[in-house]
Image (cartoon, grey):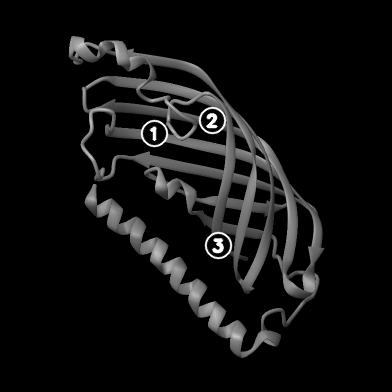
Amino acid sequence: MKNKLHVYIFLFLLFLLGFVASNSVIAQRPERIFHGNSGNKFGSNSLSLPIYPLIYNGFGIEYDRKITKQHWLKFSPTYYTSFNYATMRKTDIRSLQGFSVGLHHKYNYYTIERVGFQLFLQWGVNYSQFNIQDYNKVECSMNKFGLDIMLGFRQIIARPLYFDFFIGYGNRWILSSKHDLSAADASVSALTTNTFAKNMFDYGYGGSLLLIGINIGFLF
């Protein structure tokens, strides 16, 4: 698991290095950033790394494909796995395996091509599946379905590098959830129902939630 963590950290640092380097280019020669075809500054495809899943032991990739000038489709798979957790409290997760996949439509309703800036509205669906075990050896498997709607903006840093920021509203519904209490101590069995769904940041949460995130990627 530590080897996987090192890979994720390396990828994040690689994107961060590109961000810093591109900012240096902007500071020195800002006129070079948008040189070329003024009608194709945003390309027809984009690939990005979402930062938010890294906080919750996930590694995701988002692929955007242009349909028309203002309309794009986004496909976003994410894989979740156990990291080296910082604490050993009984409520913490001992092991985690799961994935999520999202399909969204993005509408770019305002664009300033001269500076590589876009405002967008994005909506779509999300499906996720998790298999989790906590330190009481309580195991849970679950399937969730979600709907999302978000507002955000895209800013080209130095083509092809860009970043997205978005904020919005989502809802998650638990399609199925199964707890295995056979390995759990009887004294903690009463607590297992909500072990993985105490708040909107938990993997087993169902209900309304705030969506917020930053992506760093490149256009092609």
Q: Residue at x 26, y 43 (%)?
A: 85
Element carrying mark 2? strand
Q: CA distance from mark 3 to mark 2?
A: 23 Å
* Residue that numbered label 1 is attached to: 98
Point 43% across, 36% down: residue: 99
Residue 30 shows in the view: yes
Proximity of marks 3 and 2: CB atoms separated by less than 8 Å: no
Q: Amino acid at mark 2?
A: Tyr
Q: Furthest residue to the bottom?
A: 28
Answer with mark 3 or mark 1, whichever residue precedes in sequence.
Answer: 1
Q: Quadrant of residue 44?
A: bottom right
Label 1 residue SS: strand
Q: Residue 16, how many percent across, how many down? A: 45, 68
Task: List x then y, in percent, for residue 7.
Answer: 32, 58
- The residue to which callout 2 is attached is 127
Q: Residues within 10 Å of mark 3 (few under 14, many from 20)?
A: many
Q: Which residue is mark 3?
A: 217
Q: Dot 3: what SS? A: strand
**Lateral position of residue 12 relative to residue 4, left or right:** right
Callout 2 crowding tier (Cα within 10 Å): few <14, some 14–19, many ≥20: some
Q: Amino acid at mark 1?
A: Gly
> Toward which corner of the image does residue 80 lie, by quadrant?
top left
For the C terminus, the quadrant is: bottom right
Marks 3 and 1 sit apart, C-alpha to C-alpha, by: 24 Å
- Left/right placement of residue 216 relative to residue 57 reads right
Q: Residue at x 52, y 23 (%)?
A: 206
Please tell me which of labels 2 and 1 falls first in the chain. Answer: 1
Q: Is residue 175 above or below residue 166?
A: above
Query: Residue 50: which disc?
Result: none
Q: Is residue 141 above or below residue 201?
A: above
Q: In the figure, 204 relative to 66: above or below?
A: above
Q: Position of residue 147 (x, y in %)?
A: 64, 31
